[in-house]
Each structure stands twice: as structure tokens, then as C-alpha cells.
Amino acid sequence: MKNLTYIIIFSICFLMLACNKKESTYAEKLNFNKDWVFKLLDSTETDNSYFQEEINIETWEDVILPHTPRLEPKIVNDQWQGVCWYRKSFVLPSEMKGKKLYLNFEGAMNIAEVWVNGEKKIKHHGGYLPFVVDFSNEAIWDGENVVAVRLDNRDNPTTGPKPLKTLDFNTFGGIYRNVWLVAKAPLHITDPILAHRKASGGVFVSYPEVSKEKAIVKVQTHVHNENDRIEEFSIKNTLYKNGKTIISKQDDDYSLGIDENIEFTTEFIVEKPELWSPQYPNLYILETEIVIDGQTIDKELTTIGIKTMKFVGQDFYLNGEKTFLRGVNRHQEYPYIGYALSDKANYRDAKKIKDAGFDYVRLSHYPHSTAFMDACDELGIMTIDAILGWQYFSEDEKFQNHVFQTAKDLIRRDRNHASVLAWEVSLNESWMPETFIDCLHTIAHEEYPGDQCFSAGWQAYGYDIYLQARQHRLQHYDVTLKKPYNVSEYGDWEYYAMNAGFDQNSWNDLLQEDRSSRQLRNAGEIPLLQQASNIQEAHNDNLNTPAFADGYWVMFDYNRGYANDLEASGIMDIFRLSKPAYYFFKSQRDADDPFGESMVYIASNWQKDSPLDVRVFSNCDEVELFLNGKSLGKQKPDQDRMSNNLKHPPFTFDLSEFIPGEIEARAFKDGKLVAYDNRHTPKDATDIEVKVDLEGYEIGNNDVVFVHALIKDLNGTVIPDFSGKVSFNVEGNGELLGENPVAFEAGIASVILKTGQDIKELKISAEVIGLNLSTSLIMNKY
């Protein structure tokens, strides 16, 4: 919450600064998400005329972006693939006249063709990276403009030769990220995606020298003059921290000829910089302006974090300190709406990752949204940023060139993000020829020159960092390999397949479904505790290797597309509700970490069939367990083969019998009570509670949030084996998505609330079917 407060304060301060400046005519950037219409084509329909300005759109659906073509079921094994169209009519603001006009699409799946006022402007391949449409010459000023977008998300050998039915994750469809209308002066800072120079385009910030005493900040600004005259101008860079000016530098006048584009470079020194790290994610705002005769005609704001990274042998040093990164993998999918998350929903996912005890996330297996990257910058989550790739390679030249282009575009989009650790310019779990790897490695270092760029890949050859899933390590790990090593995935496949050869002897008597880490949140206590055991064993084993980071597979449950079930190895389910393993990771963060706290969690429902070896997760020195007020003893953390490398092993209390009532855990640090947790044996249902999962981030217009109904007894205990259903209802400018009525799973039922435009008050109601239990919640947006 303190980070959100900082953003609000900074925004107010920055606006005050801007208001005090001389009147400017810099770029306009307007959200372009409202007032679209949408049409989903069936397989028999022709669509060669939908780009034309005069067509009948009365039957088209009104939509707001982000948007998914079809709401899918919770378990997706027949995802929609085909062609759909989006159209929007709009009138350009008069103040944009005479400027360069662009439409910036953050992501549209998968082959996008765009027409403006009947003129085809682009055909873009790939659904995860931005593309930009320059429609300056097509703009209409005395009437309406029309933009039409044709999307085709069918299997495509150029963007990915593995068909969706065997891909193992869903790519969904639609214009599922933001679109922006951008207006710039003819003399302007370029868009990095449109620039052709290597390591250029827009504003590129790097750090040739960084220490605690000073940092050299290098700013490259690519400027294009599309005026019909030579322009004389200067470039001004101002660095802000917490709304205050740290340094401002205006370079001498430059001259740029007609249709020339040049990159201008400047450097300035920041004394005693506040460095960015997962513990202290200090951010600065860099304002870069083109100034003519004292007037700003173009401006870009860039959020940056100053840090330095290097490897000494296989050890990772961040800001001069040896660092191990405990992390996780993430798929960006939501139930029902696929990839069409709001920016705030992306932030909430990042917040959950940070709160779970992670300082690193591998963005598998494709570029995630800019909003998620922004959240990682703010929250202090290092990222390995990946291009699309999944168990395929093709000799086809178009495919390879497309992969090369995605590597360039990914780095252009994300190079200024403080959170980026490395570029995974690699096809995940795919054999790639060495010449192909050489090209990708070279692209990474050409697009991000200097010693702060690290390429990462699945093969040991070529890349700066070797990514290897744990299940591949036993047979393929080369102990003589001395390059930096990252356990890219672990904890799932080796237990699911049971053929990885790891030390699982103590679990030989378990059936495959019981040994697996793929356990739904309603699987029961024993399977969920087994998932936590798998994770503990694997993470502990990773710490025997020279890895500088590891990433559990996976944070959230997700759809595999071809299966009749969810891939359920997440430590949270697809509705972002935690399983016991979540608290194992949370306990691995030190209490004195700036993002930490003293914590204790009892991994038991304490009911008749609960295991009598009660497991407690805590980051404290000692835990004392009580049963119905009577102490069962105080213990130190477990000491066994699964715990010898852990920062904070669990505590296991062996109870002799089940006695209903209350168990309580009290956690001590340096002899002082610092945290406690309790469980009551569940009784009959007497109450229902509705919660909206906001993660401290207020609900917004065109937002998507999870709404949960919790069935409880008179003690306020969630009843995990309740088998009924609940019916949700919403009043106000919003709609509920998903099954409704919906069954309780482990005592909680969930739907998605999608808000509309200009929301003010929402009333959410829930009623348990067959019981006289109901409740409501009123939400106000100020």
C-alpha cells in the first residue's frame, strides 16, 4: 500500500511541476479503448469488405478494450480460433491537427491487419508485442475517421509451428491489451518499434558507471524531423525522484535537416543514487523534452531504476552484493476472459507474486504486458523477459526472421525497465542450431550494448545464462559448465512424470495422482501437503547447485488447452486463491526484509480426517502449538534432508490423536512472541461473506477483479468440505463473468466482476442455494 501511496503523491507533485512550466505543445497520448464494435466470424463467412468505411455494423457488438473474442469455460479444451473484426469511428481533436498521428497497439492476437479510412496500413505477425500504425496521411479533419482491425488467431507456421491443440498453454485472441492514440509534432522523439537503427528509437537509458557514491546516466534520444524545413532545437533531460528535481540538463542547440533522423546522446551524474533492488525498488522519472525557443514541442516520460549487475563466475552480484533470487514462473491467463486483463489486474498478479516471498519471475513463455512490467519495477521483482517459444523449431526462413524480429521488439519495448535481469531470446525447451542461437545472442547485445546485458537460453551453448529445468538436470547437467546457471522450472514435472530420477524413495507407496504437484485447491489436505513437500524438497535441492536463481513452476493454475483439466501445479489456483504451498514460500522471506514480516501459518483444517503431523510454516526461531488452550510444546524448525539448505524450514508437530476444537500456533523471534495463527474445527454453515480481491488497488473503470464467497460457521471458520452452490448478483455498472450459480471449492466460490465505464457504486450480493444465507457488499469508487 505504501508503494501505491507513493505513486499518488508523485503524480500530484509532477502535475504541479508541469503546470508551472511554459505552455507546451508536446505529444498527446490518449487511451483509445472505448467505443469499439466487434464481430466474430463463423467458418462460412467471407470478410473481404469489413475494412470499408460504409458498412452496416448494427449487428456488431459494442465492446471496450481489453477484449476477448469469446468467453471461454473455466476448463478450456476447445478454445476459439478463427477470424474476428474490430472497428471504431472517431473524431480527431482539433489540437492534433498538423501533428503526426499514430495508433499504438500493445497486443493483438495473432495476425493483425489494420485499415484506417479504407487504407490498409499494416499486417503484423505475433500477438504478444506492440505494433504502431502511422495514419497521418489518412486522417480526416472534417468528419469521422474509421479504424478497422482484422485478427486471425488460427495456427500459423510463421509465429509458432506447434498447433494450439498440443501447445500446452492457450494463446486466446482479441485486442487484449491497450490501444493508444498518439499525436506528435513533425519534429519528434520516435517510437522505438518504428526505428531502424540498432539500439535506438525513442529514449534509451543506460548506466555506464554505477556505485553507491555516483551513477553516470546515459540518455540516447532518437529524433526525426518530418517538417518541410530544417529545425533548430535543444534536448532537455530532467530527472525527478519523489516529485523533486534531482538534476536537469539542457544540451546545446542541434540542427536537423528535412526528413533526417539522428540519435543524440548525453550523460549526467547522479550523486549518491538511490539504487534499485528487490528490497529497495527505488524509481526515478526521466523527462526528455525537445525544446524550440523555450517551448516544449515533444516530451517523453521514462520510469527508470539505477542498478548494476554482474556475474563473478556463477555468482550474481546486484549493486555489488552477492544475491540469490527465489522466483516463480507466471502465465498471464485469467479464467473466462483469457488474456484480456486490465492494467490493475496485472498489477494485482505482480503484488501476489511479491507477497508470496518471490523477488524474481520468469515471464514464461512469451512477453507479458507493459502494465505487469511496470508493476515489477515498482514492487521490486526481477524478471527474465522472454520471447514466444515452446518446444518447436523450424528451418523455415520466415519463422526464423520472425523470431529475430520479436527479440528486437522485446528489447526495444522493455529495455528501460529496472526489473529486467536478462533476455530469454530462446525457444523454450527446443533444440536450436548453433547458428540460430548465435543470431539471437548477437541481437540481444546489439540492441542493449554494454556489460549490463545478459542473454539467457535453454541450451548451454551460446547464451550468457544457461536456463535448465530441474527434471533435465540429472541426465544433462554438466558439472564442468561454469557459466551462470538458473533453474528455470522445478517442482512440477519431475513429480508428475515420476521419471526424473530424483530422491522420491520415501513416497514409493503413493499413487501418481497423489505424488504429483498438480493439486487443485479442493483436492484435500493430504494432496496439498504433498505439493508443499515436493516444492520444499525441490527448492532445497536447487540450493545444492551453483544456481544464482530458481523459478517454481508455476504461480497460478492455468489451462493447457488440449486437456480436460487445469494444470494445477500453481501455489494459487486460477482464481488467485492460495494453497498451503504459498505459505511455504512466504515463510522463506526474512521478517526483517523491507517487504517481509514475522509470519506463521498452520497448514491444517483441523478436522477429523486431518493429518496428525501438523505442519506449520514460519520465518521465526521457534513455534509453540496449543490445542484447546493447552501447550503441546515449543519447537525449533525441522532438521531433515528436505530442510538442510532452507532459510526457514517448516515446523512439524506430531499429535497423538484428533480432538476437535482450536489449535493455535505462536511464533517467537529472539524469545519474543511476534506472530500467531489458529484453526477451529469446522462446524455447520451459518454465514456467508463476500470479498472482492483488490490487493490494495482500488477498483477502476473497465477493470476485472475476482469476487469470492466464503461459507463459514459460527466461529468464522471457512468450511472446506461444503458442497453447495452460491448465486451472485451485481447492481450497478458492472457484469459478472463465469459460472453462476457456482459450486463452492474448499469453502470458497468465485466469479469475475468486470466493471464498466464511469462506475460509481456497485452492490454485489451472494445467496447460498437451498440455505437461508445471503449477504451483500457495497463498493464505492471515489
Image (cartoon, rainbow, N blue to C red):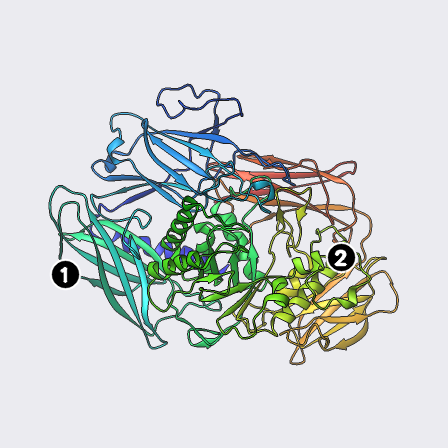
Report if residue 3 is visible in the image. Answer: no
Residue 757, position as x, y percentages in the image: 47, 36
* Residue 436, image quadrant: bottom left
Q: The residue under label 1 is which amino acid type?
A: Asp
Residue 687, position as x, y percentages in the image: 74, 46
In the rendered view, does 476 fall on the left or right side of 613?
left
Label 1 to label 2, Cα distance in Å? 67 Å
Relative to 44, residue 421 above or below: below
Relative to 115, residue 164 above or below: below
Categorize mark 2 by other alpha carbons within 10 Å: few (<14), some (14-19), many (20+).
many
Q: Is mark 2 on a helix, strand or loop?
A: helix
Categorize mark 1 by other alpha carbons within 10 Å: few (<14), some (14-19), many (20+).
few
Q: First in sequence, mark 1 or 2: give its number.
A: 1
Residue drawn at (48%, 30%) of the image: 84
Name the residue beneath numbered marker 1.
252
* Residue 680, image quadrant: bottom right
Relative to 556, residue 543 above or below: below
Q: The residue under label 2 is which amino acid type?
A: Pro
In the rendered view, does 721 fall on the left or right side of 702?
right
Q: Which mark is residue 527?
A: 2
Residue drawn at (46%, 39%) of the image: 110
* Residue 743, image quadrant: top right
